[in-house]
Image (cartoon, rainbow, N blue to C red):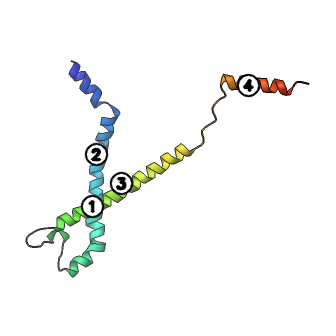
Amino acid sequence: MGVIKEFKEFALKGNVIDLAIGVVIGAAFSAIVKSLVDDVITPLILNPALEAAGVKDIASLEWNSVKYGNFLSNVISFFVVAIVLFMIVKGINSLRKKEEAAPAAPPAPSNEEKLLMEIRDALKNRP
């Protein structure tokens, strides 16, 4: 029973659940990036270069039977993902810095400080 209890505690920790959510969102984000590269970037930017090279599709690019077109498409996808993730992390870090930079309320005076303030006030009120 101990192993099952340990596994249950491990599986239900916040870190494991956060990781699972991250994997699911990453898979969905991968589909978005693939569509961005295949449907937007390739037609707008790469198609003129591909037509100049006499190639209809980036996947059909090859040199000495080495099909490097798919590799090139995956490299472009990687850079798009890297740029987007960089921007997300940069935004999150700037929000954290703003939270840290917010001035905190001054700490309440300690008992010693209160006593010293009372002594000061008493000395000021002396004739």
Query: Mark 2 — residue?
Result: 24
In the image, 15: left or right of 57?
A: right
Q: Residue at x 30, y 40 (%)?
A: 19
Question: Which residue is label 1 attached to?
Answer: 77
- The kind of residue tagged 4 is Leu
Q: Position of residue 99 (x, y in %)?
A: 53, 44
Q: Is residue 13 above or below residue 58?
A: above
Q: Position of residue 59 (x, y in %)?
A: 17, 68
Q: Secondary structure at mark 1?
A: helix
The residue under label 4 is 116
Closer to the N terminus: mark 2 or mark 1?
Answer: 2
Quarter of the rendering occupied by the N terminus: top left
In the image, 92: left or right of 49?
right
Badges 3 and 1: C-beta atoms under 8 Å apart?
no
Mark 4 crowdedness (10 Å alpha carbons): few <14, some 14-19, many ≥20: few
Residue that numbered label 3 is attached to = 85
Spatial CA distance of label 4 from label 3 is 54 Å
Inter-mark Cα distance, 3 to 2: 15 Å
Q: Residue furthest top?
A: 1
As displayed, is residue 107 above or below residue 118?
below
Q: Could you say which is closer to the camera, residue 54 or residue 82?
A: 82
Q: Is residue 115 left or right of residue 42?
A: right
